[in-house]
DNA sequence: GAGCACTGC
């Protein structure tokens, strides 16, 4: 392999889409290695990608270093190209596999098929992918740690962890695991790809390892990570700051957008705000402003963008801007990483986003508006430079950006509930959870809380080992352990068919069409399905109705139900049913006996039991466990009904703690479901 | 009377 280094070039790279996706596996090459690349035009296109001129350096660094950190913003083509370079250089020869992980599954197939196309093969041949419930390569899914290790040791030779800067829980687990595995298998090469310069802390993480024995004359890569910077976006973005801090960023957004529209040449505007509230307000203000105050404002097309938006409305932002018009998209963070808008030349950055925080003491996750990091700010700005040089207007001062804004966001690991994370590690056979070597350690309180919850569910035993069979079964189900426990209990209670429906319904965002304009109609539609027992039973009614309609989209429309969501529910339910069957769950229906359904829900969610305060006129509940003050969410069918005892599926913590998806229960079920958790004396004074 | 964004053993 050549040891030639790349020398900085002068040519500005042409901009091409950087794909994002899930897990791409390059299976061992069966066909002759490089003769399959028939399309000269594809070759040319590949060579025009910014990453191409780093090809030699990347191959050299991977050859000589155990870990290579590649820093570069999107648009470089690294996701699609680097695995191909490695394959062309022979890394996939001899039955070895090159793997690349991605944080978002939607685009996984997209990357895989794009790469397959470039290589002139079919997906599943030399290029494959693995996402939830779907494994085109048939190599990685449902493996225990031993099997995973086996897989990594004997098949994977290079693993590229893409978008590592996002620091999601799964990325951090993966990084911790890979470091562990690499110690035992020094020939394994890692590529950590990150959009931010945090490469340095990543480097320190992979550097800090115990020394290992190296055989005399053994050819092993250097252990200290290499860092390579790859240029990404094609066009400069000029940054503008405000001179004084703004007091009302929604108002500031409105005036900035109008300013751009008045003074700047054509080009779409992308605005980053925090949530639906902000966005709707801004859209309204801007629409009004455009209508009344400005003469040339007829050319503005103002569109909101957030994930809760109905599909059709979401798609409006992708329609090309008509000549003579200017599109203004007012978005949440969804446009920062998940969606890419073409044609954006101006970005307005409020400097805030909604972020999740977790309090392990109260066991409550909350969503709060918080300042973004520098890394985030850069990512937002970068969205202005995709088609030509752009401008980014930051609604905060330069002084603030330089001196006060934190360099990186807080890793998800340090601001989340960790039950799923702990069970995942346990399932991988990692017993010393508290001693696991994380890229960023989670708060010990959060770890301990997660262990407690899993213990109370009967998933872990006194030695914090997975119980048999419950623990192992729960670990097989790719859902929150409380949901999994609910499914297991439904087997004994004879209502697994119903509970699988509920589990599928709970695992998607919302089955209702969100329509602020037609709120009344939506509420009325909901009433048609509303069950006195609560939201879970209401889900069963909706599901039944959907099936009876022949899975009709018209029926959904008529009833304010999101057809896309229902299709997903059917799909997820089918997948869960397969898993349930495999782990030995008795798939029976309880017909219309809703009591057993509620008992099964209670068996998983007993920790979320709440009692209505006797004196409360306002629907105030307190959690049985921690006496937290909570309220039923206005979207629940039990809103204003306020049964005495309920369990909830999740809490939304805004100005108040709201229980979402609530079901009424009998308190005696709590003792049945978790006698160790609710000792007799804790409930007695309130039961009677 | 109210919903940042993702994923899955």
Image (tube, rainbow, N blue to C red):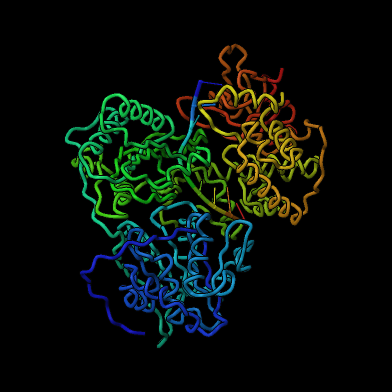
Query: So how many labels did they put on this image?
Result: 0
Vertical placement of A623 versus A423: above or below? above
Residue A519 point in image, percent of width and height: 55, 24
- Left or right, A566 with respect to A10, comes to right
Q: Do we see residue A36 in this rendering?
A: yes
Residue A259 point in image, percent of width and height: 23, 35
Q: Do we see residue A461 in this rendering?
A: no
- Left or right, A484 with respect to A200, comes to right
Instruction: Using the image as rendered, state which of residue A318 and residue A306 is in the foreground.
Output: A318
**Rendered residue at 25%/35% (across/down):** A256
Residue A487 point in image, percent of width and height: 71, 44
Vertical placement of A647 versus A264: above or below? above
- Left or right, A487 with respect to A10, comes to right
**Rendered residue at 59%/51% (across/down):** A423
**Rendered residue at 45%/39% (across/down):** A306
Instruction: Using the image as rendered, state which of residue A167 and residue A396 is in the foreground.
Output: A396
Which quarter of the rendering shows the N terminus of chain A? bottom left
Vertical placement of A370 versus A134: above or below? above
Residue A678 point in image, percent of width and height: 67, 31
């Amino acid at each position: 392999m050549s040891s030639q280094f790349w020398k900085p070039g002068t040519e500005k790279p042409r901009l091409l889409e950087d794909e994002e996706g899930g897990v791409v596996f390059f299976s061992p090459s069966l066909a002759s290695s490089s003769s399959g690349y028939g399309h000269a035009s594809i070759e040319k296109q590949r060579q025009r990608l910014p990453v191409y001129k780093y090809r030699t350096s990347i191959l050299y660094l991977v050859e000589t270093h155990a870990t290579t950190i590649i820093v570069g913003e999107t648009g470089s083509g690294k996701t699609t190209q680097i695995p191909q370079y490695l394959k062309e250089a022979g890394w996939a020869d001899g039955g070895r596999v090159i793997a690349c992980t991605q944080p978002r599954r939607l685009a996984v197939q997209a990357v895989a098929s794009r790469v397959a196309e470039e290589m002139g093969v079919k997906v599943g041949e030399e290029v494959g992918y693995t996402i939830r419930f779907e494994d085109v390569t048939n190599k990685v899914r449902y493996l225990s740690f031993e099997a995973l290790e086996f897989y990594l040791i004997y098949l994977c030779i290079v693993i590229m962890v893409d978008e590592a800067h996002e620091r999601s829980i799964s990325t951090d687990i993966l990084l911790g695991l890979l470091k562990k595995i690499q110690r035992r298998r020094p020939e394994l090469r890692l590529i950590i790809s990150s959009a931010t310069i945090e490469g340095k802390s990543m480097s320190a993480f992979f550097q800090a390892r115990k020394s290992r024995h190296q055989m005399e004359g053994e050819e092993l890569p250097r252990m200290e990570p290499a860092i390579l910077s790859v240029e990404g976006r094609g066009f400069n973005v000029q940054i503008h700051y405000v001179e004084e801090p703004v007091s009302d960023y929604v108002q500031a957004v409105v005036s900035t957008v109008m300013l751009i529209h008045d003074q700047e040449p054509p080009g779409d505007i992308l605005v980053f705000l925090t949530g639906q509230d902000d966005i709707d307000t801004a859209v309204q203000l801007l629409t009004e402003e455009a209508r009344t105050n400005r003469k040339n404002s007829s050319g503005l097309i103002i569109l909101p963008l957030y994930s809760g938006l109905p599909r059709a409305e979401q798609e409006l932002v992708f329609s090309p801007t008509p000549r003579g018009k200017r599109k203004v998209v007012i978005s949440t963070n969804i446009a920062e990483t998940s969606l890419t808008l073409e044609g954006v030349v101006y970005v307005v950055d409020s400097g805030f986003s909604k972020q999740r925080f977790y309090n392990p003491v109260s066991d409550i996750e909350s969503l709060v508006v918080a300042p973004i990091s520098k890394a985030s700010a850069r990512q937002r700005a970068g969205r202005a430079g995709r088609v030509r040089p752009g401008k980014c207007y930051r609604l905060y001062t330069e002084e603030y950006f330089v001196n006060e804004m934190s360099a990186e966001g807080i890793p998800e690991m340090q601001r989340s509930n960790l039950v799923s994370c702990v069970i995942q590690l346990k399932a991988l056979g990692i017993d010393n959870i508290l001693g696991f070597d994380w890229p960023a350690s989670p708060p010990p309180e959060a770890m301990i809380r997660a262990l407690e919850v899993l213990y109370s569910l009967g998933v872990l035993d006194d030695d914090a080992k997975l119980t048999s069979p419950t623990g192992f079964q729960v670990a097989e189900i790719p859902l929150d352990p409380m949901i999994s426990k609910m499914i297991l209990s439904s087997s004994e209670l004879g209502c697994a068919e119903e509970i699988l429906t509920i589990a599928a319904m709970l695992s998607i965002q919302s089955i209702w069409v969100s329509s602020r304009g037609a709120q009344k109609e939506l509420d009325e539609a909901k009433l048609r399905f509303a069950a006195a027992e609560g939201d879970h039973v209401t889900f069963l009614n909706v599901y039944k109705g959907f099936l009876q309609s022949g899975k009709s989209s018209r029926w959904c429309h008529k009833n304010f139900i999101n057809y896309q969501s229902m299709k997903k529910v059917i799909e997820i339910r089918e997948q869960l049913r397969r898993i349930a069957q495999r782990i030995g769950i008795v798939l029976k229906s309880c017909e219309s006996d809703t009591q057993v359904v509620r008992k099964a829900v209670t068996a998983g969610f007993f920790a979320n039991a709440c009692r209505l305060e006797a004196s409360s006129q306002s629907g105030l509940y307190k959690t049985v466990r921690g006496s937290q003050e909570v309220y039923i969410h206005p979207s629940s069918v039990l809103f204003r009904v306020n049964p005495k005892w309920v369990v909830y599926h999740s809490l939304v913590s805004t100005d108040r703690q709201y229980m979402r998806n609530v079901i009424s229960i009998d308190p005696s079920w709590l003792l049945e479901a978790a006698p160790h958790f609710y000792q007799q004396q804790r409930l007695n004074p309130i039961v009677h």
